[in-house]
Amino acid sequence: MESLGHPDAAAMRAYADELRGMFQQIQDAGMELHAEARAVQITEKSSDGLVSVTVGARGELVRLDLDPRIYRRPDARHLADTITETTRRAAARAQERITEIFEPVIPPEELKAHLDGDLETALTQLADRMEGRR
């Protein structure tokens, strides 16, 4: 029974049981998933093929390769923008891969909210689950 907009005890117990199950799944598969996630590296090439970036699991730049043909058109701003955009695309793909890896134990939308640092969405999802709306 809800009173004054607070979740009822049964919904909170159900959510706690769900969390307990999720934590058990994570613990059981955790080391394997963690190792697989840590090993993620994504390489992306720019549309002109002159820039290649590789990022790690957190989107950090691991490697940058520049084709020598970039010197034929010395435009530092264009090169910087190309590197930035290519790195963004690679980081987005890395995040997608991490989400796929953990999908068996963490709902994708929840993990994405956490990876994006979207505290508002993460808290809303938590409240929805505690109140039995998800």
Image (cartoon, rainbow, N blue to C red):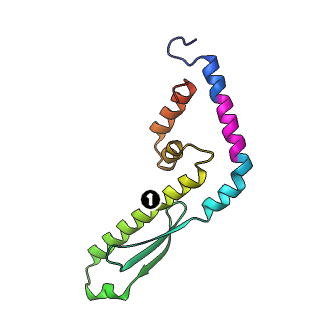
Give the residue number, with chain letter if any, for mark 1: 92
- The image position of residue 35, as x and y in percent, is 67, 61
Residue drawn at x 63%, y 18% is 9
In the image, is residue 69 above or below residue 104? Answer: below
17 on left or right of 3: right
Task: Decide whether residue 18 is among the magenta residues.
Answer: yes
Which quadrant of the figure has residue 18? top right
- Report the front residue among 64 and 106: 106
Above or below, 5 against 120 in this view is above
Near-viewer residue (4 or 26): 26
Return the x and y of residue 119 as percentages of the image width and height. Answer: 48, 40
Q: Residue at x 57, y 26 (%)?
A: 130
In the displayed structure, would residue 5 be above or below residue 65? above
Q: How many marks?
A: 1
Q: Main secondary structure of the magenta part?
A: helix
Instruction: From the top left corner, tell me how far across and down residue 22 is, in percent.
Output: 66, 40
Residue 37 found in image quarter? bottom right
Q: Nearer the viewer, residue 3 or 18?
A: 18
Q: Residues within 10 Å of mark 1 (few under 14, many from 20)?
A: some
Amino acid, disc 1: Ala
Q: Which residue is painted at 54% across and 23% down in the image? A: 131
The percent position of residue 7, horizontal first and vertical second, equals 56, 19
Q: Nearer the viewer, residue 86 or 105?
A: 105
Q: Is residue 21 in the magenta section?
A: yes
**In the rendered view of the protein, which quadrant contains the N terminus?**
top right
- 49 to the left or right of 23: left
For the magenta stretch, what is the residue range? 16-26
Q: Secondary structure at mark 1?
A: helix
Query: In the visual, does 134 lie left or right of 72?
Result: right
